[in-house]
């Protein structure tokens, strides 16, 4: 936790024990993300755990959601295609051979790359 927040372990213990009562807001934000809750819940201002921005997600899941929100439509479409493929692969419980699955992903990524290149040329960006 100390590494995530960027403070010493002793400081985290002081936060936990109430020795440091005025925790800097940037540290509260980092702590809340690491603990997958909202800053208001962490500080005791809110009793509802569900008020976290993304609900009950891990820090990595929340981080992915934040990045996804910044993507343009092409980026979101790319992520959606790969997520759908991976979901199908995992839920198929081995119905598809691993090599065939890898080929399908490679083909999909190649199609996405061709689309990206066409968009770049269309916009005149090199």
Image (spheres, rainbow, N blue to C red):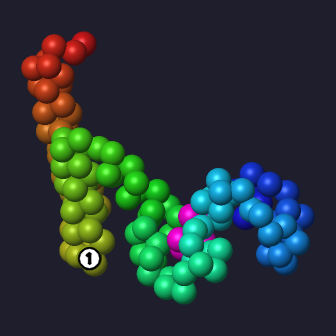
Question: In the rendered view, does 121 fall on the left or right side of 44?
Answer: left
Q: Secondary structure at mark 1?
A: helix
Q: Residue at x 56, y 64 (%)?
A: 33
Along the line of sight, the residue nearer the viewer: 46 or 114: 46
Relative height, residue 18 to residue 22 (above, below): below
Along the line of sight, the residue nearer the viewer: 105 or 95: 105
Residue segment shown in magenta? 33-38
Indicate the position of residue 105 as horizontal and vertical percent values: 23, 50
Question: In the rendered view, does 113 fall on the left or right side of 28?
Answer: left
Indicate the position of residue 53 as horizontal and vertical percent values: 43, 67
Number of marks: 1
Disc 1: which residue: 91
Q: Residue at x 46, y 57 (%)?
A: 63
Q: Residue at x 40, y 54 (%)?
A: 66
Relative height, residue 111 to residue 61 (above, below): above
Q: Residue at x 38, y 58 (%)?
A: 65
Query: Toward which corner of the image does residue 99 lie, by quadrant?
Result: bottom left
Q: Is residue 2 visible?
A: yes
Q: Give the residue at the far bottom of this rendering.
A: 47
Indicate the position of residue 123 as horizontal and vertical percent values: 14, 19
Relative height, residue 86 to residue 108 (above, below): below
Q: Is residue 65 magenta?
A: no
Q: Residues within 10 Å of mark 1 (few under 14, many from 20)?
A: few
The C terminus, quarter of image: top left
Q: Is residue 97 visible?
A: no
Question: In the rendered view, does 25 fall on the left or right side of 122?
Answer: right
Indicate the position of residue 32 as horizontal and vertical percent values: 60, 67
Query: Toward which corner of the image does residue 27 lie, by quadrant?
Result: bottom right
Main SS class of the magenta portion in the image: loop
Question: In the rendered view, does 19 fall on the left or right side of 72?
Answer: right
Along the line of sight, the residue nearer the viewer: 54 or 76: 54
């Amino acid at each position: 936790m100390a590494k995530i927040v960027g403070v010493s372990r002793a400081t985290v213990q002081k936060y936990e024990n109430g020795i440091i009562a005025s925790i800097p807001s940037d540290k509260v934000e980092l702590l809340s993300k690491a603990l997958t809750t909202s800053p208001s819940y962490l500080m005791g201002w809110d009793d509802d755990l569900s008020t976290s921005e993304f609900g009950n997600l891990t820090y990595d899941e929340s981080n992915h959601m934040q990045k996804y929100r910044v993507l343009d439509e092409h980026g979101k479409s790319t992520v959606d295609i790969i997520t759908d493929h991976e979901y199908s692969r995992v839920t198929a419980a081995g119905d598809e051979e691993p090599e065939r699955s890898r080929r399908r992903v490679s083909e999909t990524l190649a199609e996405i790359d061709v689309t990206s290149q066409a968009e770049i040329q269309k916009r005149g960006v090199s």
